[in-house]
């Protein structure tokens, strides 16, 4: 029941963006009929890593970015009562513009 | 339902080029009878990566190139309502001339 | 039956934080009905490791931190009669704030 | 339906050399009775790669070389209506003299 | 039937510490009812290894230390009639204090 | 149907040395009753490789050496009508004196 | 049917030391009832290897040493009519004193 989390290393904390999905006839589909969403919002960046020469590796994403994430990467965590995901920045495919 | 995507690292966003395929007798084959196409057009380059010495790695492809891609590489994404593919530049076999 | 343990290398000694879990009706659930907790308290840091240039790698956590750990990482050990866990710092996902 | 292909990185474009195979009695064997040929002609070299120090890696083969290739390496591509193969230079065993 | 063994490289020779285990009623359990002990005493250090720059890697344990070892690591050897274990220092989790 | 082959990189071309094997009673055993021979004669060295600093790696074998090879390594090739083997120098166990 | 073998690289040629094993009643056990011995005598050192900086790696064992070897490592070879074993020095656990 954490209130906030500081991810370690090159990890990032994200929150999945719930897809509003209706059928053509306007019926809201129950959760199990939806494919898990791939878009997420970046909530917190990790403490960072270092390259082979000891120089810090910068993150390519920043807090607030909407990102595309691999469907099966990351670890589910509960932060402030919300379901979130800690995942490696390598599991982020791109930034949604 | 992204409108644009900035791929991260050495990834590239591509759009498959639909093969127009007709049988000898001129009948258009339905989708499932076609082998998945291997040609794609480069839509966006990633933010780039760095080699072991911290020097940026340049992309060998550029936006607009027609490329040959491995049949099973990459992740399907929907951008502006179109099916696209985010894949590592390593999964691009060559540039079609 | 160790009284204290100095972890080796980049390992960390942690103690799981027991979740107090009650059903809506206030009934305390027996242990087997609970999902294993993911939060733990850092008890001791390892002797540390060195990067490729021989420089010491610093720990990103410190004794007393509440951390989130992977559910299946680490090795169970008994220290001073208590169940603890020795795990690699890489298996710590983040610091709970 | 590419007319030419520029392979990326340390890849090479080759064209298999069709073995003319007749039985002792002079009968031409249909394709399925032949073992896939291992000899190929180098059609195009890749854009090249770089070693760990950033120096370009030279190709050991050149266009026009007849090479021996691993039977199961590479990816089949169609260039100018002909079946060709894009493969890593590492999958070339040797140059036929 | 070795009388002594000099481990090679980053290996360490250890002797498991036999747990004295009695049930609540004071009955000594036969061997097969006990979980294999994880504590061991360091008997000999290896000849040592070298890091990528050719500098010797120092051992974090010393002869006489009581250590915690992974349950399934190492190779059983008989030294001077006693059952011992040669294992990599990486398989030592920590030093018991 | 190559007449000669220049192996690439750290590969070596060898020709297996046929074991003359007779049973105690002097009967020559057919091929399938023999274990595949492990001795081979070095026919040609590869173009060589480079270490991480770009310095050429020298071969430890030379043409004409009789070597011991792993039973299952290498690729069978036909050179000048003879069955030969292209294999990595790493698959050569030793030089027979 | 080699008379001598010069192992390549970091390999070592060893000869297993036959264990004389009798049952309590003095009966010599046939071979199949014995566990394969782990002690061996070093017969020849390899040509040596080089570390990442091109400096030669020294062997930690010398000819004549009695060593402990992993039960399943190495390749069986016949030298001068005797069964021997070529194995990587890494598969030697320690030197018996």
Image (cartoon, coloured by chain):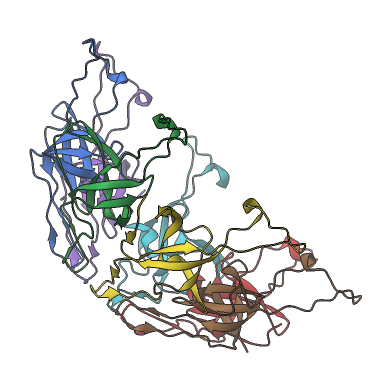
Chain colours: A purple, B blue, C cyan, D green, E red, F yellow, G brown
At horizontal 39% and vertical 40% (from top left) the residue drawn is D36
Q: Left or right: where does residue G1 sit relative to residue E27?
A: left
Q: Quadrant of the C terminus of chain A?
A: top left
Say which of G49 and C59 sits in front: G49
Q: Left or right: where does residue D40 sit relative to residue A58?
A: right
Task: Please state the horizontal and vertical placement of residue G70, each as a whole percent of the image.
Answer: 59, 71
At horizontal 16% and vertical 37% (from top left) the residue drawn is B14
Quadrant in which residue A21 is drawn: top left
Is residue C5 among what the camera can see?
no
Say which of F61 and D66 sits in front: D66
Query: Is residue A45 positioned above or below A49 on the image?
Result: above
Q: Left or right: where does residue A44 sit relative to residue E62?
A: left
Say which of G7 and C81 sits in front: G7
Question: In the orientation shown, which residue stands out farthest toward the front?
Answer: D25
Task: Please state the horizontal and vertical placement of residue A90, each as a whole percent of the image.
Answer: 26, 51
Quadrant in which residue D75 is drawn: top left
Task: Please state the horizontal and vertical placement of residue G76, each as a whole percent of the image.
Answer: 60, 69
Query: Is residue E6 positioned above or below F92 on the image?
Result: below
Task: Please state the horizontal and vertical placement of residue G9, each as a whole percent of the image.
Answer: 44, 76
Tally the numbered discs.
0
Query: Is residue A59 positioned above or below G36 on the image?
Result: above
At horizontal 44% and vertical 64% (from top left) the residue drawn is F14
Is residue G85 among what the camera can see?
yes
Say which of F11 and A34 sits in front: F11
Q: Left or right: where does residue A13 sit relative to residue F38?
A: left
């Amino acid at each position: 029941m954490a209130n906030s989390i500081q991810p370690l290393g090159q990890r990032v904390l994200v929150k999945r963006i719930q897809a509003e999905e209706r059928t053509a006839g306007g019926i809201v589909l129950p959760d199990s009929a939806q494919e898990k969403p791939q878009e997420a919002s970046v909530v917190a960046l990790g403490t960072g890593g270092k390259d082979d020469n000891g120089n810090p590796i910068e993150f390519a994403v920043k807090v607030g970015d909407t990102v595309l994430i691999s469907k099966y990467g990351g670890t589910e965590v509960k932060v402030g009562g919300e379901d979130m995901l800690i995942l490696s920045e390598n599991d982020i495919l791109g930034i949604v513009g």
